[in-house]
Image: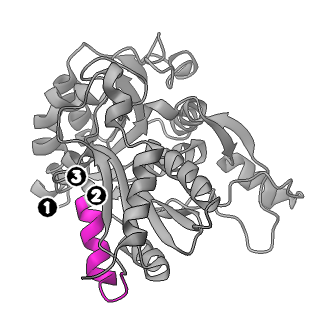
Amino acid sequence: MPETLATTPGTAPPAARTLSLQTALNLALDELLAEDPKVLVLGEDVGTLGGVFRVTSGLAAAHGTQRVFDTPLAESGILGMSVGLAMAGFRPIPEVQFDGFAYPAMNQIITQLGRMNYRSRGTIPMPVTLRVPSFGGIRAPEHHGESLEAVFAHVPGLKVVSPADPQQGYTLLKAAVRMNDPVIFMEPKSRYWQKGPVVTEADAAGAVATGAAHDGGASPDAGTVTGARVARSGRHLTLVAWGAMVARCLQVAELAAEDGIDVEVVDLRWLKPIDAETLATSVAKTRRAVVVHEAPLTAGLGAEVAQLITERCFGTLKAPVERVTGFDVPYPSGDLEDEYIPNIDRILFGIQRVLEYKRG
């Protein structure tokens, strides 16, 4: 994966601006369209309307309707068109309006998008970044809140990523679009309006060029796009999460600290490939781990994460890896979301079970 936002050693880090996740993604798309005429944005209502969540707002006016355009209401057609555009040398960024709407396009995602590079022995790359507003938390109807990361991650040839905050949204989206591999970009829709510090590439380049003093507001990991990141350092236990659950785990860590429990939070970010090295380094230090995700428990991505931790840290683990997840039922509509999505109490109970575990 390419690095972005790098700074020259010895220079002051750049100042950050405060943006919402929605605005940070919009800015990234705007800059990507400006830098490469082969970048295209397509999907239902992404043009004039600017997307259901307004992530593409203003892009059609700025870059033209030949590059930011609406499609028919047909997800299989959107992905099939994107595959063809990639074969013709373009770098398409399709969007499906909600995660549950990806189901009609699974044939194109699995049998075409994920396989074309392999099928052509590397002669036909697939630089397609599929933006998928994902997960729950907005009390939407059925099929408007899903957690499909395990489905996507199981498909050979696909990369899967989920940002947790505005800086991650900006940095990871630019990295994904610049890759020659197909990337499923899962945006936590409940976090679109979360605001946080964002260092843009222009900010970073300007700081390097001028050596301007740093105001202390920049995100500490603004320059990284590879692997997982440690969102909070701790000593007693590692919480592993991605997407919207990272913010919840950070809340849990603050509450646990009131009881003297020092929790480390690892934001997985790249759900495929998984950064096993960062996981192992964290758990080797804390010797305990809890994995949190919204998807159902059975065959969820947490099982893969737990196994990777167990394989690398078996000799140092003080307890089995715990999972706090959604339930083995279809993702519910909004009135039941609070019961389904892992809440603070359930995560704290998971931490308690791991801390109190005693070998028989």
Tell me, yes or no, if residue 273 can be seen here. Answer: no
* Left or right position of 327 against 344: left
Spatial separation of the CA atoms under disc 1 and disc 3: 31 Å
Which residue type does callout 1 highlight? Arg
Nearest to the eye among marks 1 and 3: give it. 3
* Residue at x 50% of width, y 46% of height: 248
* Residue at x 51% of width, y 59% of height: 225
**Where are the magenta residues, as a range?**
303-317
* Left or right position of 135 against 112: right
Name the residue that disc number 1 marks.
121
Front residue of 76/318: it is: 318
Neighbor class of circle 1 (other Cα within 10 Å; few <14, some 14-19, many 20+) is: few
Q: Do the residues labelled 1 and 3 touch (CB within 8 Å)?
A: no
Q: How many marks?
A: 3
| Mark found first going from the N terminus, 1 or 3 | 1
Check the picture and name the quadrant holding the C terminus.
bottom left
Spatial separation of the CA atoms under disc 1 and disc 2: 32 Å
Neighbor class of circle 2 (other Cα within 10 Å; few <14, some 14-19, many 20+) is: many
Neighbor class of circle 3 (other Cα within 10 Å; few <14, some 14-19, many 20+) is: many
Q: Do the residues labelled 2 and 3 touch (CB within 8 Å)?
A: yes
Name the residue that disc number 3 marks.
300
Q: Where is residue 94 in the image (x, y as percent from the top left)?
A: 33, 31
Main SS, magenta region, reads helix
Check the picture and name the quadrant holding the N terminus.
bottom left
Name the residue that disc number 2 marks.
302
Which residue type does callout 2 highlight? Gly
| Mark found first going from the N terminus, 1 or 2 | 1
Secondary structure beneath dot 3 equals: loop
User: Would you say residue 272 sits in the magenta stretch?
Assistant: no
Q: Where is residue 347 in the image (x, y as percent from the top left)?
A: 42, 52
Q: Do the residues labelled 1 and 2 touch (CB within 8 Å)?
A: no
